[in-house]
Amino acid sequence: MDLLEKYKEILIEGLEEKYHSQDLQAISFELPRNKSHGDFSTNAALVISKKNNVDSDIIFNDIKNIFNKIDDFQNIEITKSGFINFLIKDVVLQNFLFDILKNKKNFGKKNIGKNKKVNIEYVSANPTGPLHVGHTRGAVFGDTLSNILEFVGYDVCREYYINDSGEQINNLARSAHFRYLQSLNNTDENIPEGLYPGEYLISLGEDLNKKFNSQFQDCSEDEWIDLFKDESINFVMELIKKDLSLLNIKHDVFTSERNLLTENKVSKTFELLDKKNLLYEGTTKPPKGSKKEKWNEEKHILFKSKDFGDDEDRVVKKHNGQWTYFMPDIAYHLNKYERGFTKMINIFGADHSGYITRMKAAVKAITDENANFEIKTCQLVRLSRAGEPVKMSKRSGSFITLKEIIEEVGRDAVRFMMVSRKNDAQLEFDFEVFKNENNDNPVFYIQYAHARISSLIKNASNKLGLKLNDKELLNSDLSLLINENEKNIIMLLTNYPKIIEQSAMFMEPHRIPYYLRELSSSFHQYWNLKLDDKRILIIDDKNKDLSLARITLLRAIAITIKSGLSLLGIEALDEL
């Protein structure tokens, strides 16, 4: 059950009889920031009085009459500012706790998506080397967003686009051939400039030596380059998949750019744009900073990107007949659309922000504006150790790899930190913080809350001589939960379904870590609660009924923490 959604629906349905439904869209029903303002608050009187020129006291009376029919509230009052505050009856909150126990892992689940297909493309790193820290944030963000959208009823396809054509892949094949010759001839010379120097290709060279012996030692490049492209791409993609598996990330579909080219899907997309009269021959402006007299104004084929909101038209075919990198990307998105994905989400790095408007323009053009296409960008991650910047890998001398980060702080820490802030905000990741087992480490803090509850319930079972199964807990007397901290925790639990809904609707997974930290903090405060300088025992073998009620509350907290961590791809530990 989602109490906030339930009451908002009751409110809007009741007001629709008297006021226009379009005037009610801006109404909110939520937890107030200031607890002294009650349990729930709505801006309904403000919204309606402004749009209908009706006195807010009249609207307040309408709202009171609506909610008096369901009898869930002790008190409803309007403030001087026009907000209406609600004080809920304890029995409603008690039943809400029981609902959490009944729903278990489905608590907070909604059917917003109604099984609508959505394609989420993320990572899509060039297959030229292992993943590094620059790829990690987008990988975790995309995977977590996929989890959330599945949880609210979407049919999610997790996709990886392999950029396996172009000069970068030619250089990868040449790099592999160099390592092959090194292994074959047992030499150790420096790799030529322009090739990929990473040591990860040494083992590929050794494999190629075992497989082909001296077959390609003295051959011209055109005799081996296509074969070495295939071998190199397969090798690097296996590295990438292994790296992703360290984060428990698995894609459903891998789409190859080369396949789009060889299957003529790029040329067919070009023909489609031409039929739509969206292509023309023309020249482009000189790049910023270049001298006009040195700019060679050659004629290219341009896509009318400005017609769809871009700031300039874009070249799709060069004067020499070669495709630009933009044209296969257009074909790829048409391919997604033809596979039935009218809702598409791309996760880009911050370095691709300039690509957004042209890509959105292209999708509008090829789908006749029938697709819902979103692009989310992930800002940079700054690594530090005890506050000092960490820029280079000790092992490779270049970017720190995803594998190295996980080896140092663990998978759960990496997954949590990468979605702990809004995706378009810069992120600082301090290794030392996540190594410490204290309150500064948010993953430890949240997992410790779950482990504490698991341990307490286990000990309580022995102490109270009860099984503490659902049957016993669902018959507990929750009217005994009269402590203010207990009510505050229950009110916080009522907000979880809304957190999930907002995370999905706004594509903002960071809302879940924030919420889990707040919920865990409330639990830890409750654990350490004192009265007259004496710590209050949550489990009191002299008062079984009260203990049982409190265990019911703790079980509800644990279910919620486990649900939230699961969406983040993090394990809820029963012991640390």
Image (spheres, rainbow, N blue to C red):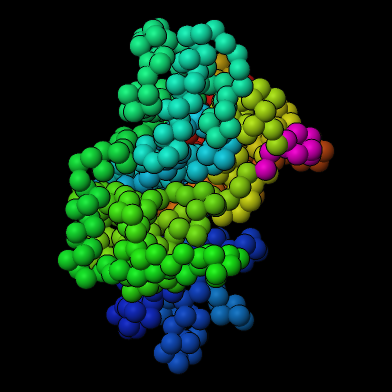
Q: Which residues are magenta?
A: 382-390
Point out the residue furthest to the bottom here. 53
Look at the image and tell me whether residue 164 can be seen.
Answer: yes
Residue 177 in the image, given as x and y percentages of width and height: 45, 21
Q: In the image, is residue 318 above or below residue 122? A: below
Front in this rendered view, residue 37 or 461: 37
Residue 179 in the image, given as x and y percentages of width and height: 50, 18
Residue shown at 25%/50% (left/top)? 266
Number of marks in the rendered image: 0
Front in this rendered view, residue 408 or 473: 408
Residue 11 position by quadrant: bottom left
Residue shown at 64%/25% (left/top)? 396
- The answer to if 386 sits in the magenta stretch is yes
Look at the image and tell me whether residue 557 can be seen.
Answer: no
Q: In the image, is residue 64 above or below residue 455? A: below
Q: Quadrant of the C terminus?
A: top right
Q: In the image, is residue 234 above or below residue 9? A: above
Residue shown at 45%/92% (left/top)? 53
Would you say 431 lies left or right of 251 here? right
Residue shown at 57%/28% (left/top)? 192
Q: Does the magenta stretch mainly form a helix, a strand or a loop?
A: strand
- The answer to if 549 sits in the magenta stretch is no
Would you say 309 lies left or right of 377 here? left
Residue 538 in the image, given as x and y percentages of width and height: 64, 32
